[in-house]
Structure formats: structure tokens, C-alpha cells
Image (tube, grey):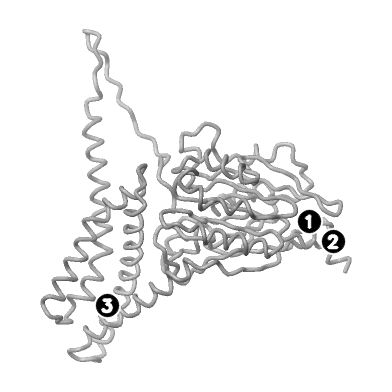
Amino acid sequence: MAGSGSSGSQTDTVQAAAPPDGGTAAAPDGGGRRRRSVLRRVAVLVLVLLVLCVPPWWTLFAAGAQWPGPVFVAGTVLLAAWLVSFPFLMVAGHRSARNDRAARVADTSLGVVWVLFTWSVLGGLADLVLGGLDVGGVDRARAVAVAVAAVSAGLLGWGHYEAMRVPRVKRLDVLLPRLGAGLDGTRVVLLADTHYGPIDRAAWSARVAGAVNALDPDVVVHAGDIADGTAAQRREQSAPLGAIRSRLARVYVTGNHEYGSEAQGWLDRMAELGWEPLHNRHLVVERGGDALVLAGVDDVTAESSGLDGHRADLTAALVGADPDRPVLLVAHQPKYVPQAAAAGIDLQLSGHTHGGQIWPFNFLVRIDQPVVHGLSRHGERTQLYTSRGTGFWGPPFRVFAPSEITVLTLRSPAASGAN
């Protein structure tokens, strides 16, 4: 999910002529446009919340289940209370004040409602089909409501476990035609989207660091969205990253969430922990007489953040790089791959998508990104690996989108030919 900030759209400004007395005249309709814009945003928000709330209310409480009056009233009041309170909890939890308690309530409840919405829609469809087949009789609606509640509760319990566990290790070989034989077998460990945030996961972070070290990596990459909050706010949770070891390099790029959380502070923090921030720059690693360029760019949202010197600039990142050497590019969002392919990048590593995190959100992610997860090819030379992410954003659930620590073993055709 993209971080907050400028959308990149341009707003026309109205310049009024100065009045004869030398005073300043305000744009005649500026206040009205702002009010209309705010009203439109509020209307969209209310519509979205209603869309999320109505199917669970209907399927669980109102669609002929004929629950006792107190059950119907309690369910209706609970959903209405969430609809009204959720926007205020989100603002309190995720704006500048960052009240972590409010954020935890807002994020968790959003995940619960999303799962209830999904399975209530599916339950409602099942109810229609069964009704058309004249199956279930008068108890059908109540049975569907119970089934939806049970499935949702089971998925939320399992999804919370999946979100909070140390990610499973995913391994794959990636053949890079331009990779020299000396670098064959190079192990690149990819982390992304740790999202240190309102839930204190310092102990989880330490276990992740231990899991990475057990993989004996040559290169460790953090592909951005390190946290929700500033480096000072999430200092304890990020500290274990300093214990991660690698033979050749540890590199990091900013994600979109850093640009709502003092991005420069995170670049400084990662440098303090011994990582190389690839802030539109590259470094070269060598082994066995062969070299690999490790380049990185800022997130695509960086330019709209207003921070001087922050934007995705692949040209700057590759200045001085030998064009005959293979390039591994770290760019937070998969959607940067057209630029990578145009530049002849060999392999781009990204995160951002979380694999959808909570099914079926992956279908919405696919509208914005070319890939949701896995290895893909783009153009003649460029390959893209998109991680499902190591942590989670917001709702502490992962449903049908497991987290991962990825080990990519780079393979050279020259070495394969020699064998």
C-alpha cells in the first residue's frame, strides 16, 4: 500500500489582481474548492466503510437468520460503532502523533472486517445458490451465518500466527547470463517490508536476524518499507539488523513508507547499523576475479515527498558503473521494472506487494503492480524477483500470502558450462 503524501496531480491556482489599496486578494473560489475536495474524500471514505460493513451485517445478522433480538442489536451496534470510530482511530494511530495503541486497534479491526467482508460475500453467494436449489430450508441463513463466522475466526487465528512467526525461507536459483564464473553460487538474502510499527516486534526482529545469519549469505538486501514510524520511534525494533552478517555487502533502499516517516533518518539509521544505503548509488562486489554491480534507487514516491535529493534516479545510481558488468538493482516497487528493463538491468529485487497479505487483496494489488510475487522476466535481459515481504503492514494477519526470507542463489552459465 502506498504511503501518504502528494498524489502527483497538479492543482490550478487562481491569481487575483492586487486591490488598489495595495492589500492582498485571496483566490475567490479557493476555499470552496478545498471544502468540496474534503467533502468528496469524506464521501468516498464513508462509501468504502459502508461497503465493508453491509455484507457482514446482512449475512451474519439480517439475512433471515432470525437471531434473538439482543444478538441482532449487538451485531448491528458493533459494526456501526466500528464504522464511526475507525477513521478517528486511523488518524490518531498513523498521522504525526502516532498513538500506537490507537493504531493497533484500528489495524486489527480493519483486518477482521476485511476477512468478514470477504467471507460474508462468499457466504451470501452460497446462500443464493442453495436457495435456488431449494436446499437448507428455513435454517439455511443461520447455517450460512455460523459457517461464515467460523471460517472467518479460523482464518484470522491462523493468519495472525502466520504474520507473527519468523518467515519461512524460500530458496531459488537465478541464472544471470552475464554473471562471471567467479560469482557463481553467490547467495543473496532478500528482506523487505519489515514494517516495524505499533506492535513491538523487537524479539521477532532478533529472530529474523538469527535466521538470516544461519543462511551464511554473501549479500543481504533490505528492499524498503523498513518501518511505520521514525528511526527514533522504532530504534529498538530495528537494532537487530545491526547483527546481520554477510561476506560481501548489506544494502538497503527506501520504500514508500519511509517517506511518511522521515526517510533521511532511516538512511542514517541503516548506515549507523553498518548497512550501505543505496540512495541512487551503487557499489561493486567481487569474488573469484569477477564483479557484480549492486545498485539501488529511492522509491518511486520519493520525488513527491518534497525532500531535497530524493527521487528514483537510475541514471545517477549507475554513474561510473562498468556497462559490461551484470547489475543487481534494488527498487522497492515492482512497477519500476520498465525503467530497469530499458537500462538493461540483469536482476531487479523488489517487495511492496506483500503478496496481497490478506486474500483476495492480491487481485487489487495486481491492478497497481506488474507482479504480485515471484520471479518474472521483462524484456530481453531483465528478471524481477518480487518478495511477499518479511513482515506485515497494518492488520497483523497474513491469509494465503505467507511472509518470506528469500535466498536467491545466482548462477553463471560460464560455471555451468565448465562443469
Q: CA distance from mark 1 to mark 3?
A: 54 Å
First in sequence, mark 1 or 2: give its number: 1
Q: Residues within 10 Å of mark 1 (few under 14, many from 20)?
A: many
Relative vertical location of residue 369 with respect to residue 156 in this rendering, above or below: above
Total marks drawn?
3
Name which residue type carries label 2: Ala
Relative vertical location of residue 162 with respect to residue 100 in this rendering, above or below: below
Pointer 2 residue: 414
Query: Where residue 96 appears, x then y in whole percent?
Result: 37, 42
Residue visible at 52% across and 44% down? 300
Q: Secondary structure at mark 3?
A: helix
Q: Residues within 10 Å of mark 2 (few under 14, many from 20)?
A: some
Question: Residue 71: which disc?
Answer: none
Nearer-the-camera pick, 304 or 116: 116
Q: CA distance from mark 1 to mark 2?
A: 8 Å
Q: Secondary structure at mark 1?
A: loop
Query: Which quarter of the figure is the N terminus placed in?
Result: bottom left
**On the image, which quarter does residue 375 sit in?**
bottom right
Relative vertical location of residue 317 with respect to residue 354 in this rendering, above or below: above
Nearer-the-camera pick, 154 or 359: 154
Name which residue type carries label 3: Gly
Query: Where residue 122 appears, x then y in whole percent?
Result: 32, 76
Name which residue type carries label 1: Leu
Question: Residue 124: which disc?
Answer: 3
Nearer-the-camera pick, 299 or 336: 299
Residue visible at 25% across and 35% down? 33
Q: Kindly indicate whether the residue at mark 2 contacts the one at mark 1 (C-beta within 8 angstroms).
A: yes
Q: Secondary structure at mark 2?
A: helix
Pointer 1 residue: 179
First in sequence, mark 1 or 3: give its number: 3
First in sequence, mark 3 or 2: give its number: 3
